[in-house]
Image (cartoon, coloured by chain):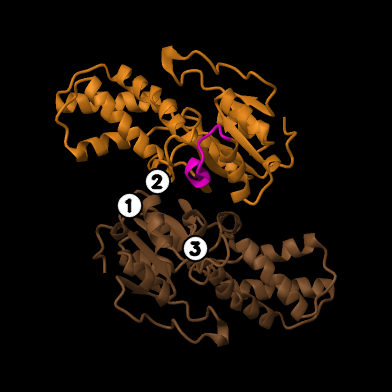
Chain colours: A brown, B orange
């Protein structure tokens, strides 16, 4: 540990690594459903919504579809699921509000205190498939103290395409070896490492609740392996 | 005043509006020259450097040159001026260091305390012709508490092209009328207003030192007219 002296910036995967999307969305949809008298299995709805995430991005990654931000992909998936779960007759403004639940996700308890420590020594930013607006309003809502908001939209490429990582380092004026990706997902770290990034794995074993099947532990010898952002701050010597 | 209830985000011109580029650069170049035994008129050098800014960007705006970030334009201008002022034999690393003086500019005294007040009620960000890396490292160095760093590089268009303003609002998920440009330059505000932005003029009458010829006062009835970011916070009701 501490063996990454060339690193100047830490960039973070967001969904699952920084914020607990599943609990946040289930909680808000259940409250919304109770208030509106709409009863359905909101946990299954949430898991389905996340399940449509990779196929929707793959349309863009493959080039079959022109560049499209995640807010739009989320909204299309929402329409599909409202039909599937027979939630009908919602006005557009209500659907917009529901779609922006992704802007209102809650951080894991260690996220904000850990980021504040890491920020004292490093430039900290996002490297997320979320679009800039989604990430900026999420940060404003949750108190995430980013120095810079970067990711798929600024790179015009969804992770794990190499350009998502490389263009983010270039935009910071850094070489890839000067940037560390922090993520709870081994595949994201593998894609970043293939482009020369330093890597930190933060285990989030409850991200998918009882449906979690992987990423319980580091699958490779990442530069840092820890269980929280406080552990990352310890490993990197941030007081 | 206070008559802009629809505004949710404030975006700021940076050079001259947030930071005092001229005094910062003259001070650092004079110290560097003294340490290295290089004597020249560093004030004239600095004014020349800024003088090459608009012509360099115009090559890109006009389409004669493909998209090029400001760090690169600054570096080319620096080469020109090192020759003109007969500062010779510098290694590349030294020129890189000098070029990054634009990453180390000092804020006006009211900038940081004003931004902290404004941030309590609004999303605050840059809308600058500076590139993301320049602005991110400047913020880290100067303690500028941006929520988001946007501008020419993320919009792929230099101000005052309409796309620089419009794509910034779109990236925040807002309509132009929900975004206020804060700037010390009437022409920047006019270009933003033409795209539907709200506007705030902050007078910076010493930006160009004794060479200042314009922007001593508001030339139109902007939504807010003030002399500091504290005055802006007062006008917008930010405690």
First reached walking from the N terminus: tag 1 or tag 3 = 3
- Left or right for B75, reference A162: left
Label at residue A174: 1
Disc 2 marks which residue?
A: B133
Q: Nearer the viewer, residue B167 or B185?
A: B167
Q: Please state the chain letter of the residue tagged with numbered disc 2 in the rendered image.
A: B
Q: Position of residue A86 (x, y in %)?
A: 80, 79
Residue B85 belongs to the span the image colors magenta? no
Q: Is residue B154 magenta?
A: yes
Q: Determine the chain carrying the residue at label 3.
A: A
Report how many numbered discs are placed on residues in the image: 3
Label pair 1/3, CB-CB below 8 angstroms: no
Residue B221 lies in what quarter of the image? top right
Q: Position of residue A89 (x, y in %)?
A: 85, 70
Secondary element under disc 3, as helix, strand or loop, is: strand
Residue that numbered label 3 is attached to = A128
Q: Chain of mark 1?
A: A
Mark 1 → mark 2, Cα distance in angstroms: 9 Å
Mark 1 and 2 residues: CB-CB less than 8 Å, in contact?
Answer: yes
Name the spot of residue A173 as percent of width and height, x first.
35, 48
Q: Quadrant of the C terminus of chain B?
A: top right
**Residue A78, image x, y percentages:** 70, 71
Give me the residue at 53% from left, 71% from top: A58
Q: Which mark is residue B180?
A: none
Within 10 Å of disc 3 (Cα), the crowding (few <14, some 14-19, many 20+) is many
> Which residues are the magenta region?
B150-161
Label 2 Cα neighbours within 10 Å, binned few <14 / some 14-19 / many ≥20? many
Residue sitting at 52 percent across and 81 percent down?
A206
**Dot 1 crowding, Cα within 10 Å, few <14, some 14–19, many 20+:** some
Q: CA distance from mark 1 to mark 3?
A: 18 Å
């Amino acid at each position: 540990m501490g063996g990454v002296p060339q690193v100047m910036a830490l960039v973070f995967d967001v969904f699952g690594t920084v914020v607990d999307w599943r609990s946040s969305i289930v909680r808000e949809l259940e409250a919304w459903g109770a208030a509106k008298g709409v009863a359905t299995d909101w946990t299954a709805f949430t898991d389905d919504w996340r399940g449509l995430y990779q196929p929707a991005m793959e349309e863009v990654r493959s080039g079959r579809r022109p560049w499209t931000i995640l807010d739009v992909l989320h909204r299309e998936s929402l329409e599909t699921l409202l039909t599937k779960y027979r939630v009908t007759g919602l006005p557009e403004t209500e659907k917009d509000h529901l779609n922006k639940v992704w802007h209102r996700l809650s951080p894991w308890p260690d996220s904000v205190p850990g980021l504040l420590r890491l920020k004292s020594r490093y430039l900290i930013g996002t490297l997320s498939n979320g679009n800039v607006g989604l990430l900026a309003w999420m940060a404003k809502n949750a108190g995430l103290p980013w120095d810079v908001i970067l990711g798929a939209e600024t790179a015009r490429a969804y992770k794990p395409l190499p350009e998502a990582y490389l263009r983010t380092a270039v935009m910071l004026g850094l070489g890839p070896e000067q940037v560390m990706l922090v993520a709870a997902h081994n595949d994201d770290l593998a894609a970043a490492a293939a482009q020369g990034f330093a890597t930190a794995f933060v285990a989030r074993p409850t991200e998918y609740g009882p449906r979690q099947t992987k990423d319980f532990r580091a699958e490779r010898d990442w530069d840092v392996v820890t269980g929280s952002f406080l552990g990352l701050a310890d490993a990197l010597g941030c007081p």
